[in-house]
Image: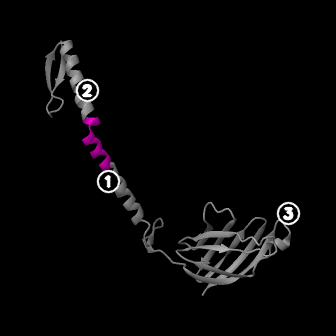
Amino acid sequence: MRGWLKGLDTPSVILVQRTDRQMARALARALLKMRRLFDGTRQRRQMRSSIFAALLAASGMLVSSCGSTYLREGSAARPMPSFDGLYSGSIRIRNVSSSSPSDWCKTTPAVNIKVRNNGFDYAMPHPNVMGNPTPVYPAYIYPDGSIRSVPGSVAGVVTGQVTGNRMEGVISGLGCEYDFTAFRQ
């Protein structure tokens, strides 16, 4: 005879003497109760709703952290700067690849960039190339004023900086590289 646990569904556990056959039945009943406990539809729904509530709370915290303030390590919350507006200026060729004719890189020297929600899409015409292709360079202005291409952009890379009302940077396209400078109107 061995000692076995009785009353798995109650807080108190009582040891009683049982035969091997009785122990096997008690074990089967206990496993069945445990299976019902973990596999029951009501419990699964409760567990799913608990997981859903936790995910909802986590997404709420994530969304609330994307509000009008941003944090830097060791500093207090500051309002998110807005760089929105129309920037007008000029663009010039900085570098031409040896495999590209320099005429192909020529573009309109005036640049007008409309920034909305701290982002912009700059369309650069190439009138000396057959079909006048106009690649679009999407970019985002970060809270520190740095300008970077939107990830996944195929046309090229935009880098730069906004300081006060002045925007300047570099656009590296396919075979051509440009400097641009613009001021907020």
Q: Position of residue 73 (x, y in %)?
A: 47, 65
- Quick one: SS at disc 2? helix
Q: Is residue 39 magenta?
A: yes
> Image quadrant of residue 128?
bottom right
Pointer 2: what residue? 31
Which callout, 2 or 3, points at the residue further toward the start of the chain?
Answer: 2
Q: Identify the disc placed on residue 7.
A: none
Q: Residue drawn 62% across and 68% down?
A: 148
Q: Which residue lies most toward the front here?
A: 131
Secondary structure mostly seen in magenta is helix
Q: Callout 3 environment at 10 Å: few (<14), some (14 to 19), or many (20+)?
A: few
What amino acid is labelled 1 in the image? Answer: Ala
What amino acid is labelled 2 in the image? Answer: Leu
What span is colored magenta in the figure? Answer: 37-50
Q: How far apart are the alpha carbons under marks 3 and 1? A: 58 Å
> Image quadrant of residue 173?
bottom right
From this view, report whether residue 145 is shown above or below residue 50.
below
What amino acid is labelled 3 in the image? Answer: Ser
Q: Callout 2 environment at 10 Å: few (<14), some (14 to 19), or many (20+)?
A: few
Q: Are marks 1 and 2 in contact (CB under 8 Å)?
A: no
Pointer 1: what residue? 53
Q: Position of residue 164 (x, y in %)?
A: 58, 82
**Horizontal side, residue 99 vs residue 58: left or right:** right
From this view, report whether residue 144 is shown above or below residue 111.
above
From this view, report whether residue 37 is shown above or below residue 80.
above
Q: Which residue lies most toward the bottom here?
A: 185
Q: Quadrant of the C terminus?
A: bottom right
Q: Position of residue 109 (x, y in %)?
A: 75, 81
Q: Are marks 2 and 3 in contact (CB under 8 Å)?
A: no
Q: Are marks 3 and 1 in contact (CB under 8 Å)?
A: no
Q: How far apart are the alpha carbons under marks 2 and 3? A: 75 Å
